Amino acid sequence: MAISGLVGKLDVKKDPDALLRLFSVTAMVSIVIILLLAGFGFREGLERFVESAAEEDATSISSALLSEERDKIIAPYADGGSYMHIDPADLPRLDQHLRQFLAPFGIVKIKIYSNDCRIIYSTETGIIGMTNLNNKRLNHALTGVADSKFEKKEDVHDLAKEQRLAVDVVETYIPVKDKQNKVIGCFEIYQDVTSTWTIFKNSIALLVGILFLILMVAFGLSFIVIRKATRSVREIQQAIRKQAITDPLTGLLNKRQILHTAGTEFARARRRREKGMPDAEVAFIMVDIDQFKEVNDRYGHLAGDHLLKEVSDRISTSLRGFDAVGRFGGDEFLIILPNTNLDEACLVARKIWMLVREEPFVLEGDQVRGTVSIGVATSQAGDTSYTDAMKRADDGLYRAKSGGRDRIGEQAEVLGT
């Protein structure tokens, strides 16, 4: 659910890096889940193995005990049947013998039950004679099926009556059957598997560690591949985005984007004006190359394209980093100057005008003097849209053109050469 929610929030189409972040989160979650499941699986498998091995040992030990002590543990009925019984007088001898017999096998405790769940012998002598009717595992064993379970005992007394702490044991119930194959009782054997389980725990840690390294390498290589792919996608998207907003010839903003910028800056200037903030104006400069058609007719369209590119470069060098310029038409440019009043805009316009006219352009080997006509305007309090200011700039450009070209037309007048 957490990952699916994250996927919903990430827009991979718009942000390729989101795919990389999604992969990283998914990889980390996957590694944790895999390691937890693997560790749990290894542990469960090894526990079952330890239980199975201990159950086999307990079965063999029980059989050996019955072979040696059958007459002292099993008593016959008159009808030929048998039952579990230990003579109280024989308990001291039996206890000593069982402790000696079981010591080499890692047994820490043993109980012997009759078929009515009564304890007839235990290495914990204080519980002899008690019944354990609610013991589900004991009752299960009395149906004729051995039952083993791995457990950790925080406190246990071994056969030498010494206290041992934090012992790993397998508790096994082994049914005892008579010659007629009838269950007449049960052995409960606690086998110490601490040393074996310690080895297995270390093996589990080693396996999980190796698996972690394998997963890190696998996901790491995948991360590198995906990162390379996302970089390629991002570069392609950037190229497409640039193509969508720029003029392919000049590298300036195209008409749609420069008009979008005009609207954005006009709205920002109006908000500043409404808040009574300073510099609440945005200036618009329209630049038109004089006699551009004659250049195309005389030198060809390639030379005309070269002239457009050169003029756009000179305009760009005249602007601040946060100003915007775009190709508005065939040989016309629109410049947006945020936080700029009319006097400041006119200084920028004059700088552009001078840069264009003072250094000739080289067209087909000829040095050609180029000029531009410029219209300048700024936003005003009564404007409802950026188009109002642009119209005044366009009117200024018209006045500059009709006044002889090669000049700057301000909102209300023409600045001549």
Image: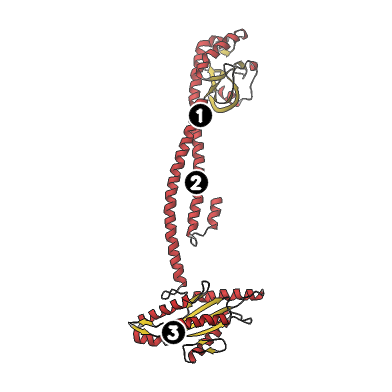
**Residue at label 2?**
30
Q: CA distance from mark 1 to mark 2?
A: 28 Å
Residue 141 coordinates in the image, percent (x, y): 56, 23
Q: Secondary structure at mark 3?
A: helix
User: How packed is label 1: few (under 14 Cα within 10 Å), some, or many (20 or more)?
Assistant: few
The answer to whether residue 187 is seen in the rendering is no
- In this view of the protein, which residue sits in the foreground, 26 or 88? 26
* For the residues bearing labels 3 and 2, Cβ distance under 8 angstroms: no
Residue 179 coordinates in the image, percent (x, y): 51, 14
- In front of the other: label 3 or label 1? 3
Query: Residue 134 lies in what quarter of the image?
Result: top right
Q: CA distance from mark 3 to mark 2?
A: 66 Å
Q: CA distance from mark 3 to mark 1?
A: 90 Å
Task: Looking at this view, name the residue that lies furthest to the left.
Answer: 365
**What amino acid type should be assigned to the residue bearing mark 2?**
Ser
Residue 194 coordinates in the image, percent (x, y): 52, 26
In the image, which disc is placed on residue 198?
1
Is residue 413 depicted above or below 212 in this figure?
A: below
| Mark nearer the N terminus (3 vs 1) | 1
Q: Residue at x 58, y 14 (%)?
A: 84
